[in-house]
Amino acid sequence: MAVDETVRQHKYLLDESQMPTAWYNIIPDLPEPPPPPLHPGTHEPVGPEDLMPLFPMALIMQEVSQDRYIEIPGAVQDIYRQWRPSPLFRAHRLEKLLDTPARIYYKYEGVSPAGSHKPNTSVPQAYYNAVEGIRKLTTETGAGQWGTALAFACALFGLECEVWQVGASYDAKPYRRLMIEAFGGEVHRSPSDLTNAGRMLGANPANQSGSLGIAISEAVEAAVADPTVRYALGSVLNHVLLHQTIIGEEALKQMAMAGDTPSLIVGCTGGGSNFAGLSFPFLREKLAGNINPRILAAEPASCPSLTRGVYAYDFGDTAGMTPLMKMHTLGHDFVPDPIHAGGLRYHGMAPLISHIYELGLMDAEAVPQTECFSAAVKFARTEGIVPAPEPTHAIALAVREALKAKETGEETVILTALCGHGHFDLPAYDAYLNGRMEDEAVSDERFASALSTIPVM
């Protein structure tokens, strides 16, 4: 067989001196401010004192900051340099397989110690808690990526880490649990019998597969019971999305190195941190009139909060312990089908992304998981990286758009975030490759029950 010498991989690398030294806060650049979180009892906007049992003051201030840029602490930058700046690739071989004129780029975050984008926020969260003298962090995890990242960060700053892992993921991904434990974290299957929320919600057999909402309830309950413990969230909140913008800031520089400008930016969305991290710096440039890409969120068809949820104030957890956040939600009681992309099984979308969606500054499409894994296999066999199940949703939409470009001949430049590798997700690939993976047809009736429990404002 002749070797095709015309297909060469392009890899765009920044050196350490080009790593961003500040996170980008998009809120001051939006045409309207996002609605504030509300106290669940009074329905009044929450103040810093309401959040202090959960977060250190530095993160609370970032949550409400009006500063466009927030400096990354030196200690955090030092740890970031272990894997940052991360590479940007041009997917020449995938383009050739698809026979498309579209140019496809992907920002690869699987080079971090945890194998995903999550340490971009776990490291600063652990740092700020350590500075304030906290001894332990509690959290939830869906696919296990966030739990892994937080256990890694806690180990670096001498903190204990306790993780409630969604039951379906705990059962399907034992190696992710073992990685959390290798970093020093303690892992519980959620719902558990260790918390009041876990015992109450776990009594319903329909909840036994677990959900991110249930796991959040358990982790929050454990945190507020001890003044030396705080809670850490891996997505959804403003400060988490803020920390992830280092992805997009680097990608802006790397696209300039490539001499290209994206016409489409697509990222997977569960809680929204990966999508925000890639897209917000580009949205800043779009709002300034410098570029004009379409910004597209890819979500799972079995948990489609943006495309089939309602925009309303709802709890971030199932037991109703968190502040009320205005977001696209399927209802805090919704327990999604145990799809393979465990990190996207969240009933609500980040309030900031929901607000931007309502402003018409981005689009969203839902993708069935068999289409995602079909695209993932094409990607793995051309680009040499087995993607985590979550970013396969974005890869699937990138493939769709690349094939459209083949039909129309329209110049299309696609940028996506490959937010993690799938080395601990191979049972999902086994199900797909051996014909056992199915797409759930979610009816409106399925959503109706959970949507009926959204608080009346």
Image (tube, rainbow, N blue to C red):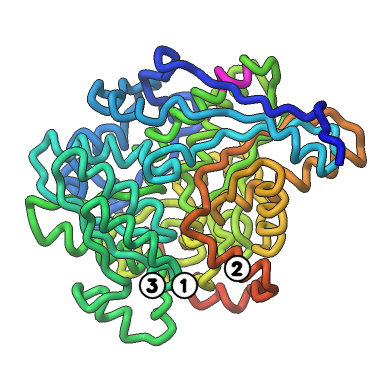
Local crowd size for mark 2, using a 10 Å CA cut-off: few (<14), some (14–19), many (≥20) = few
What amino acid does circle 1 point to? Val
Q: CA distance from mark 2 to mark 1?
A: 24 Å
Magenta part mainly helix, strand or loop?
Answer: helix
Which is more toward the observer, 186 or 319?
186
Which is more toward the observer, 436 or 208?
436
Q: Quadrant of the C terminus?
A: bottom left
What percent of the width, then of the height, locates residue 418? 56, 42
The residue that mark 2 highlights is 430
What amino acid does circle 2 point to? Asp
Q: Nearer the viewer, mark 3 or mark 1?
A: 3
> Is disc 3 placed on a helix, strand or loop?
helix
Q: Earlier in the sequence, mark 2 or mark 1?
A: 1
What percent of the width, then of the height, locates residue 246? 44, 28
Q: Earlier in the sequence, mark 3 or mark 1?
A: 3
Q: CA distance from mark 3 to mark 1?
A: 11 Å
What amino acid does circle 3 point to? Gly
Name which quarter of the figure residue 374 lies in. Answer: bottom right
- Residue 38 in view here: yes
- Specify the label residue 167 is tagged with: 3
What percent of the width, then of the height, locates residue 294? 69, 34
Name which quarter of the figure residue 130 lies in. Answer: top left
Q: Nearer the viewer, mark 2 or mark 1?
A: 2
Q: Residue at x 63, y 56 (%)?
A: 307
> Is disc 1 placed on a helix, strand or loop?
loop
Which is more toward the observer, 199 or 448?
199
Q: Which residues are magenta?
A: 252-256
- Residue 285 in view here: no
The residue that mark 1 highlights is 335
Q: CA distance from mark 3 to mark 2?
A: 20 Å
Local crowd size for mark 3, using a 10 Å CA cut-off: few (<14), some (14–19), many (≥20) = many
